[in-house]
Image (spheres, grey):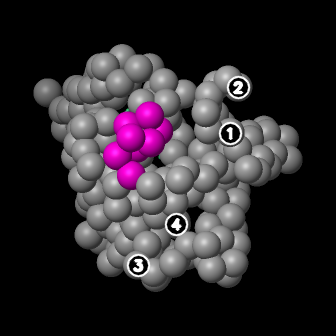
């Protein structure tokens, strides 16, 4: 068999493994795709976090969690633009998680790290802010858990997904992001 066939077969097998793994995690985690937030969404989140820092509402030391960090590009952007923050991404899906860890080791930044865990099962009470692009159902579970567990002020910026209209937490700010393909960013204050 020529070398080209061997490469092609290897490429095909790897692609099938990666796609199957992504799809299995997608189904397990509530059909949330592993797509990343766009650069302009990341910029909008950083802008809003900087506004809160300038207003003195976000104080040092601050810890920002990306709940469902995927391949880590949103968390990396935020960490790079807010060097004073500690940014931690939680991700369960195998390939995105290890890709994010690899990229952080190669290009940094140092204030960024990733944990392979279900963010619904971990203690998030030291958070200053959340950045998320996960389903409404996940958001509700995290918010309800934190309401009972802490009085701490936590800023929460969500790409596209928002709490139900009748929920106890409602946005203090919303922004439409993008020129052609528009997405909304919702900003919440817990506590
Ligand atoms: C749409 S991606 C968002 C990635 C990144 N936050 C961004 O905005 O670019 C959502 C990610 O959340 C992960 N996820 C969903 N539920 C999760 C859970 N309970 N614990 C950990 N990760 C979860 C999925 O595997 C997926 O990679």
**Residue 155 falls in which quadrant of the image?**
bottom right
Residue 183 pos. (x, y %): 74, 39
How many other residues sit within 10 Å of disc 1, few (<14), some (14-19) or many (≥20)? Answer: some
Q: Secondary structure at mark 2?
A: loop
Residue 37 pos. (x, y %): 58, 47
Q: Quadrant of ligand 1?
A: top left
Residue 17 pos. (x, y %): 24, 26
Residue under pointer 1: 170
Q: Which mark is residue 41?
A: none
Foreground residue among 78 and 38: 78
Residue 140 pos. (x, y %): 49, 30
Tell me which secondary structure the magenta stretch mostly adopts: helix
Q: Which mark is residue 61?
A: 3
Q: What residue sits 34% from the left and 55% below the top?
A: 125
- The residue segment tinted magenta is 143-150
Q: CA distance from mark 3 to mark 4?
A: 15 Å
């Amino acid at each position: 068999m020529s070398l080209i066939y061997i490469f092609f077969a290897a490429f095909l097998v790897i692609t099938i493994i990666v796609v199957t793994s992504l799809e299995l995690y997608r189904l397990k985690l509530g059909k949330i795709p592993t797509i990343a937030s766009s650069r302009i969404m990341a910029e909008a989140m950083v802008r809003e976090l900087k506004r809160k820092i300038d207003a003195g509402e976000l104080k040092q030391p601050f810890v920002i969690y990306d709940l469902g960090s995927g391949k880590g590009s949103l968390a990396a952007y935020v960490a790079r633009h807010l060097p004073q923050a500690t940014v931690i991404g939680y991700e369960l899906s195998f390939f995105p998680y290890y890709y994010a860890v690899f990229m952080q080791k190669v290009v940094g930044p140092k204030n960024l790290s990733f944990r392979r865990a279900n963010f619904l099962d971990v203690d998030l009470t030291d958070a200053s802010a959340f950045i998320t692009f996960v389903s409404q159902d996940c958001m509700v579970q995290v918010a309800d858990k934190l309401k009972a567990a802490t009085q701490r002020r936590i800023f929460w910026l969500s790409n596209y997904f928002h709490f139900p209209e009748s929920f106890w937490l409602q946005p203090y700010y919303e922004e439409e992001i993008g020129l052609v393909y528009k997405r909304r960013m919702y900003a919440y204050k817990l506590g």
